[in-house]
Image (cartoon, rainbow, N blue to C red):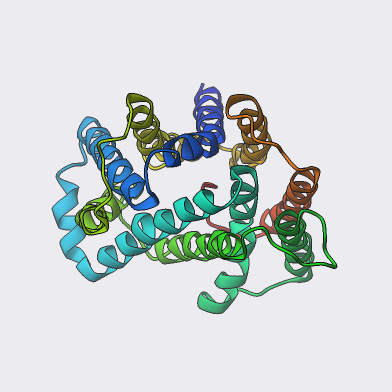
Amino acid sequence: MNERRALGFGLSAVLLWSTVATAFKLTLAEFSPIQMLAVASVVSSFALIAVCFFQGKLSQLSTTFFSNPWYYLLLGLVNPLAYYLILFKAYDLLPASQAQAINYSWAITLTLMAAVFLGQKIRKQDWVACTFSYLGVVVIATKGDLLGLEFDSPFGVALALVSTLLWAGYWILNTKNKADPVVGVLLGFLVALPLAIGLAIYEGNSWAHITAKGWMAVTYVGLFEMGITFVLWLSALKLTNNTARISNLIFASPFISLMLLATIIGEDIHPSTLFGLVLIIVGLVIQQIKFSKKNAVDSPSS
């Protein structure tokens, strides 16, 4: 029964994450990245507060935060503040298919950063995985023109790559976090929320033009990219006795996402994007084979 529930939670999380690239583009059509961050953070905070309330964990918030306040301040600055602000800007500058595919290489970035900050050894499999994945990134960014190395938006590609550094860095910081993971994520949002709102006020963009469709899209992002889906994924990993099987579900997400982008918002998917994404997935599979032989931190893809 637990395995069936774990599979259900895992599939639900993957399907919801598959929709967020489309939701990002729909939201960015009406919101600036900073406005989007502020509103989505408000929605996510309320959603996670509700989850903690129903799980009886609200009482842990203050004790957890004051046990190490500077640590949780740092977590909140990294994610959601810096990570999502940079990710949303990358989506604003690039086709969603390119931004989400490049962002998907974060797990390879995690391997390299773990070697630097956690002292983990990089094996031959890691270098092979890195080669495939970053070749895939270059293929996507140049639309297959590897020799020309011309980018439609060099700044957008750079931001997408920086987002992988921030997301991987967030999980490295979390290796030292002994608190309940949902409580830890909520604390990050509560720390970042006043800063995100302050940035939106400082930016000074008008809110009058935003339609009901825009408000629905940003609410969806707050609930299902930055909030509830994370809880579903954690629940799946907690219930299963086969973590690898649940983790491998995430490989379907980017391909489902490409189909949704093509059908819902009519984005043209360049063949090089699909080929580059396959290279990234090959790298991740190679990495997965290596990680199955030793302890690793299971974490969701975004």
| 247, above or below 156, in the image | above
Which residue is nearer to you in this view: 14 or 215? Answer: 215
Left of 47 or right of it: where is 166? right
Q: Which residue is drawn at 58% across and 25% down?
A: 264
Which residue is nearer to you in this view: 253 or 175? Answer: 253
Residue 143 location in percent, x, y?
77, 53
Q: Which residue is drawn at 52% across and 36% down?
A: 17
| 185, above or below 294, in the image | above
Residue 75 location in percent, x, y?
33, 62
Looking at the image, which residue sits at the far right?
A: 147
Residue 201 location in percent, x, y?
20, 54
Residue 291 location in percent, x, y?
67, 57
| 115, above or below 163, in the image | below
> Which image quadrant is residue 4 in?
top right
Which residue is nearer to you in this view: 74 or 184? Answer: 74
Q: Which residue is drawn at 77% across and 67% down?
A: 149
Which residue is nearer to you in this view: 102 or 294? Answer: 102
Q: Residue at x 54, y 39 (%)?
A: 21
Left of 198 or right of it: where is 153? right
